[in-house]
Every structure is written in structure tokens, then in C-alpha cells.
Image (cartoon, rainbow, N blue to C red):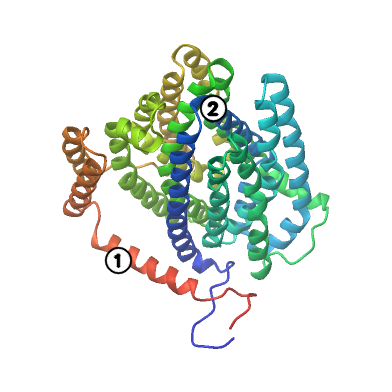
Amino acid sequence: MTGNASPEPSPTAPLDDGRAAARGGLSLLVLQTFGRLLGLVFIFVATRQLIPAEFGRYSTVAGVVVLGSFLADFGTSSAMTRLLGRRPADADRLLAGTIGASLLLGIVAYGAVVGFAAIAYQGPIIGDMAIGALAIPSASVLSSLLGALDGVGLIARRALVTALQTFVVSAGVVPVLLGSGVRGALAALALAPAVSLLPAMQTLRRSGIWRSRPRTDPATIRILLRAAVPFALTGGLSALTMRFDVVFLSLVRSTAETARYDLALRLLEAGTYMSTALTAPLFFLLSRRLGANDIEGARRAYGEAVRLLYLLGLPISIGVLLLARPIVDVALGPGYGAAALPLAIMGAAQWVNWLNYAQGSLIMAGNFVRRGVGVAGLLTGITLILDVLLIPTLGPTGAAIAMVATWTLSAVLFHRLHARTVGIVTPVPSIRLLIPAVAMAIAVFPLRDRPLPVPVLAGACLYVAGVCLSGAVTGADRRRVVRMLRRTAEAADRPTDGEARP
């Protein structure tokens, strides 16, 4: 090893978990910002090339593929993160012994998805599903690799792989522009996880985390599956909550309505990545803290993550609520105006959805996963009932109302669960944060009919000034961000152990 720079800390070093989480969260935020911008470009172009009925075919396939991918993953990615977060040295054995099983699960899930399409749909959408669902087998393997990267603290490296996957999906707009129709975009959807597999494997190999050849190891598979069962249950329940509405809507309403609701979700998800940039490192940190029985450390990490989620989520929710129609007009163009109402309804509660992500991380990292699964099952049942009652009559609006009700009830029930089990409560937004948020809403409301940049810039400037003056953002926060930026830049200039050095 040459030069003055010290080597990157080993991913197994327990004292470096806070720095790894912070650097990983920042990398996720930066790279996923780029990825979401690409996603918005995809939406902007595709909605101007495809009529709502055609985009509805893409929405239907994407929704079913998400459900199939959760089925194929079977909770193994989250189980991998949890296991390696507590015992990083087991990475090689777990990866080598279970990758084959992950691929097999993916193939089985692909067959189940195509079979479902043949029974439930008619016409070209069956062929659409056969193309798009090709993503599932490779996504099943990729999810295990990404879970391993998170588990050993290489969250920043995982962010690069995820960004590549998003780029390939978004590149599906190119064949659409060339006249391929919706199937060109579906082909890109299918190709994205396969393209991302190689850099994920190279990162694990070069870092020395995965050294052995893949093999079938029944004992290791049993260990992973045993740990994955609670995650499989919660992941499946989460998938139903997230995408059952889209699939059910596609069965009982038109493809055009399905497209409008799905696009409202996609516009919301353009901002949701900010929450995952915080909760992915939070899961890693909580797994380490709770694994060491450091309840106070877990409480501090959780409280800080929730504070940051409120800081980002409240202004975004207010902005989407007040500016839903101009956002839809700019992003989607003519023919999709009906997406504004479900976007406004769900946008108003987006901050609650972000809070749910943090609460879920605390459940999955702790020792009361079974109780969390029970609560999640109850919430999923309520969600499905609301969807079945509201969607046939209200369409996308009913789906949005059911989603907001689920988010709100989840926040309440998970708060009570955490308080009773680990003794960690979910803090409410502080008055120092609420005052700038209300001031922003008052300022943006009369500007909502102006060109979109006007209310956005005015609201953002007022909110940033307000949180700085009120003390919601402190000098310590600003110094922490500067340190994270500096450390991320330094880490980017240093190769990891096992990589070739100049």
C-alpha cells in the first residue's frame, strides 16, 4: 500500500458504522437524485409519445412485476442485510451458498406472473407481461447482492449499482421515441437488473467480501430462509399495499385510469427516494446498535432520522398538495390532467409515508419482528378492504384515499408498537419546523396559478430561511453535512481493499 492516504475502513469495523451510514446516505441521496431526474425525463417523454391507454399497459406490467419481484426476493435481501449487519464475516458463506436458490425463486416467480397474466388479462398485455417479467429472475439475484452490500456497510457502492439500474429503465424512452411503442420500454425494464448484476458482483469480489464460487449449500439456505421469513411476510404485505391498488385498478377500470393513477404514484416516488436515502443507512445502523443491545444509540439514530424526514417531507407534501395541477401539466402534458387529484391527495400525506419507512426500519432491525408482522398484516387487510370498496366506484381517487388512510394508520400503530417493545417513541414535528412550513403554505397558495418555477422557488427560499431562523436547522447540522461531503469526496479517491491501486 503506497501513498499517504489511509485505506478505506474495513466494512466489518464496528467503530466505522456511523461514518459508513452517513457516507452511504449521502451517496444514495446524490445518485438517486440523478436517477429520479432520469425517471422524470422518461415520464415527460413517454406521456407525450403514448396515449393513456398505451401507458396503462406499461403501468399494469410494472405493477405486477413489482409484486413478482417481492415474491422472488422472499425477504432474503433484508435478511441478508440484517445478518451481515451483525456478522459481516459471514458474507462469503451466505452469498456463495444461496445465490443459486435466489435465481430459482426468480424463475418460479416469473412463471407465476406470466400465468397470472394469461388468466386475468386479454389481448396484447399478456405478451407485454412475458417481456417485462423477464426482469424478475435477475432482480431476485441482484436483490441479494444489494442486501449484502448494505449489510457490510458499502451503502455508497450499492447506490452506484441502483443508479445504473434506474438509468437502464429510463433509457427505455429511446426505443419509444424510435417508434417501438410500449414494448421498447418494457424491454428496458426487463434488461435493467441483468445489466446491474455485473458491477454488483465485481464490487463484492474486489472488496474481498465474496470470494467463493456459487454452490448449493442447504444448511446456509435454511439459515437465510429462516431469517427471511418475517421479511418475506412483511415484504409481501408491503408489496400488496404498494401495488395491489394498481393491479386491481387495471382489472376493474380502464387502462387509461390505471395510467393516470400510476403516474401520480410515479411523480410522488420521484421524491420518495429522499426518504430511502435516510432509511437504508438507518436500517444498517439500527441493526448494529440493537444487535449490540445499545438501545440509547438506536434511539438517537432513529430520532435524528425522523427529524430529517420531517425537515424534507413537510415542505414537499405542502408543495405537491398546492401545486398538483401545474406539476401534472408540466410533467405529463395533455391527456393526463385527471392525475392531479390523486397526486394532491397522496402528496398531502407524503411526509407520513416517509415516516412509515423509518418506522419499518426500526421494526426490521429489532427483536420484535413477529409483532411487526402482525401489525403489518392487519394494515394490509385494511388496505385491501378499502381498495376493494373504493376503487370500483371512485377509481384513482378511491385508490389515493385508501393509500393515505393506510399511511396514517400505519404511523399510529407502529408508534404504539415501538413504545411498547423497545421503548423508542416516534417524535412529532417540532414547532420550530411547523411554523416555517405553515408560512411556506401561506406564501405559495396565492402563487399556484403562476408558472411552476415561481411558487416553487418562492416557497423553497422562504422555507429554508424559516428553518434556519427558527433553529430547526442548526450550525451543527450544516457542519455535519460539510463533513459528510468532504469524507465522501475523500473516499471516492481511495480504492477499497482488494481493488487495484495505481
The residue lying at 72 percent from left, 23 percent from top is 118
**Number of numbered discs on residues:** 2
Residue that sits furthest to the front in the current view: 179
Tell me the quarter of the picture where residue 59 sits.
top right
Q: Position of residue 362 (x, y in %)?
A: 49, 45
Residue type marked 1: Arg
Vertical comparison of 7 with 418: above or below: below
Residue 463 in view: yes
Looking at the picture, tell me which residue is in the foreground, 52 or 411.
52
Q: Position of residue 65 (x, y in %)?
A: 63, 35
Q: Position of residue 127 (x, y in %)?
A: 70, 30
Q: Are marks 1 and 2 in contact (CB under 8 Å)?
A: no
Q: Which residue is mark 2?
A: 56
Looking at the picture, tell me which residue is in the foreground, 213 or 284.
213
Element type at marker 1?
helix
Q: Which disc is residue 109 wearing?
A: none
Name the front one of labels 1 and 2.
Answer: 2
Residue 423 in view: no
Element type at marker 2?
helix
The residue lying at 57 percent from left, 44 percent from top is 172
Vertical comparison of 392 with 244: above or below: above
Residue that sits furthest to the top in the current view: 393
Q: Which residue is mark 1?
A: 479
Residue type marked 2: Gly
The residue lying at 79 percent from left, 58 percent from top is 214
Tell me the quarter of the picture where residue 371 sits.
top right
Dot 1: few (<14), some (14–19), or many (≥20) neighbours within 10 Å? Answer: few
Q: Quadrant of the N terminus?
A: bottom right
